[in-house]
Image (cartoon, grey):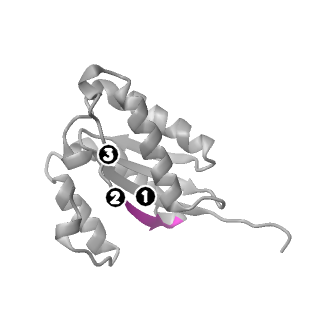
Amino acid sequence: MPQSLAKIITHIIFSTKNRQPIILPDVRDELTRYLAGGLKELKCPAIEINCVSDHVHVLCCLSKTMSMADLVEEIKKSSSRWIKGKSPFLADFYWQNGYGAFSVSQSNVPDVRAYIAAQEKHHQKVSFQDEFRAFLKKHGMEFNERHLWD
């Protein structure tokens, strides 16, 4: 085959350090646009992004030339720097060390997009921790509770 073709759709979830509810509503839309722009530059186009007070959901296509670890490191690093410059209140902003990344089939993209878009409503009933544990269980991932949170 003379060319390399790939379409790897992934749902990435990461939270603020200690799940601090520091992503205020007036910054969320800008942060979403910033993340989308960063993903585009990395050739990992966003399909859906939503930020709530203490975490972010990103649905995107992973570039065939980038590892998941490099993608998440880059978007967290650049967005953290950007957020810190938005306000003195945000000068101590940090993302958690880890992240979750889950594969999504093309046929499930509409459902995952709807799920991500409804985060505000979803988290009126379910905490981030419970949501993340449910994702890990749904995807058959073994985990140690002691090492999930920082």
Q: Position of residue 113 (x, y in %)?
A: 42, 51
Do the residues under discs 2 and 3 have CB atoms within 8 angstroms?
no
Vertical side of 91 occupied by 37: above or below = below
Q: Position of residue 105 (x, y in %)?
A: 51, 67
Q: CA distance from mark 2 to mark 3?
A: 8 Å
Check if residue 130 falls in the magenta segment.
no
Picture quadrant of residue 54: top left
Mark 2 or mark 1, which is nearer to you? 2
Q: Residues within 10 Å of mark 3 (few under 14, many from 20)?
A: many
Question: Image quadrant for the N terminus?
Answer: bottom right
Q: Amino acid at mark 2?
A: Gly
User: What SS does tag 3 mark?
Assistant: loop
- Tell me which numbered mark, 3 or 1, is placed earlier along the sequence: 1
User: What SS does tag 1 mark?
Assistant: strand
Q: Which residue is mark 3?
A: 95
Vertical side of 113 occupied by 20: above or below = above
Q: Is residue 33 left or right of residue 4?
A: left
Mark 3 or mark 1, which is nearer to you? 3
Q: Which residue is mark 2?
A: 98
Question: Image quadrant for the C terminus?
Answer: bottom left
Q: Which mark is residue 11?
A: 1
Task: Please give the range of residues in magenta.
Answer: 99-105
Q: Amino acid at mark 1?
A: His
Q: Residues within 10 Å of mark 2 (few under 14, many from 20)?
A: some
Q: Position of residue 11 (x, y in %)?
A: 43, 58
Q: CA distance from mark 3 to mark 1?
A: 17 Å
Front-lying residue, 39 or 127: 39
User: What SS does tag 2 mark?
Assistant: loop
Do the residues under discs 2 and 1 have CB atoms within 8 angstroms?
no
